[in-house]
Image: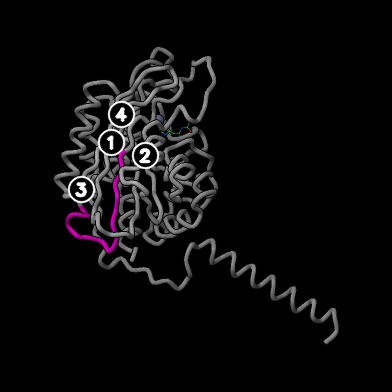
Amino acid sequence: MNIPYTFSILTAWLILNMAACGSSQQAGYAEDETFSTENVPVFNADSAYHYVKSQVDFGPRVPNTEAHQACGDYLIQQLEKFGAKLYVQQASVSSYDGKLLNARNIIGAFNPESKKRVALFSHWDSRPWADNDPDPQKHFTPILGANDGASGVGILMEVARQLQQQAPSIGVDIIFFDAEDYGTHRDYNGEHKEEHWCLGSQYWARNPHIQGYSARYGILLDMVGGKDATFKYEYYSEMYAKDVNRKVWRTADKLGFGRYFKKQDGGGATDDHLFVNKLAHIPTIDIIATSDQYSFFEHWHTVRDDMDAIDRQTLQAVGQTLLQVIYSEK
Ligand code: AHN
Ligand code: ZN
């Protein structure tokens, strides 16, 4: 065997191997893994919509307000009603402007005995200021956060209802973070730091509800109810949990939701998953709406983030994809 011949065979083998390897890694799991919608419950978007509206009906869920307290109580009651084992984490966290916020992370554990777990996250507070509103007069008006906050919680509440009706093979933790959206006001003259956001998740990641808590992976929902929303591979999700991203996007595609879940790189979001990844070391993705025109969704941090911004079809796409992922875990 002469040297050039060996070289070319080797090169060809390497190239073929790399290509094959690249595609199977991209898919997150082998191409021939069976995909079946059998034994996966049907997500009810009307039900999810109702859970979104119930939160919004309390008004802006800004920490240290009555509406916030009342909505937190409602979320606890609902998760209890669905048979979850409840953990309520009370934390006093400080905001960038030196306020002490009474925060509660609300956690519902399903099948708490199982060691095989998946964590699902969303934030339940809403932003105190519409500081991205086109009308500067509104920059200190609190927002309803129908999409930014309530949509993810609404979907997870419907997931919780399904978990009670039909148990999957694994344990699921539904975790509602507080005080995500109290980050620096756009007019703030001091330093804008990522640690100013996501106060509830930072607390939880340092003090999990169960000592040494872990999960196979986590999925964060943020702004998952907007009409014609598009979800792209978010930067930190790719960095910390690429295979989870691929698994979820592939699942969505197979269910026919490819028009929502675009297999493209999106920007980065300083969101709860960042701290879950960095501090709790649970590989976690963020399903977050992004658009080419706006940084996130059109009415992000504006007074128009109300129920009119919510579309049942988007809730359906995200909710059914989540159920498919959860009930496929063995
Ligand atoms: C930023 O990246 C500044 N914010 C994303 C986190 C967020 C705020 N999600 C909803 N509101
Ligand atoms: Zn926000």
Instruction: Tell me the crowding category of disc 1: few under 14, some 14 to 19, or many 20 or more residues within 10 angstroms, Cα based.
Output: some
Q: Amino acid at mark 2?
A: Asn
Name the foreground residue: 321 vs 81: 81
In the rendered image, the residue lying farthest to the top is 137
Q: Quadrant of ligand 2?
A: top left
Q: Secondary structure at mark 4?
A: strand
Q: Say which label, 2 or 1, has the lower sequence index.
A: 1
Spatial separation of the CA atoms under disc 4 and disc 2: 14 Å
Spatial separation of the CA atoms under disc 1 and disc 4: 8 Å
Q: Position of residue 156 (x, y in %)?
A: 28, 46
On residue 85, the disc is 3
The structure residue drawn at horizontal position 40% and vertical position 62%, both measured from the top left corner, is: 254
Residue 164 colored in magenta in the image: yes
**Residue span colored magenta:** 162-176
On residue 89, the disc is 1
On residue 191, the disc is none
The mark closer to the camera, 2 or 3, is 2
The structure residue drawn at horizontal position 24% and vertical position 25%, both measured from the top left corner, is: 59
Q: Say which label, 2 or 3, has the lower sequence index.
A: 3
In the rendered image, the residue lying farthest to the left is 81
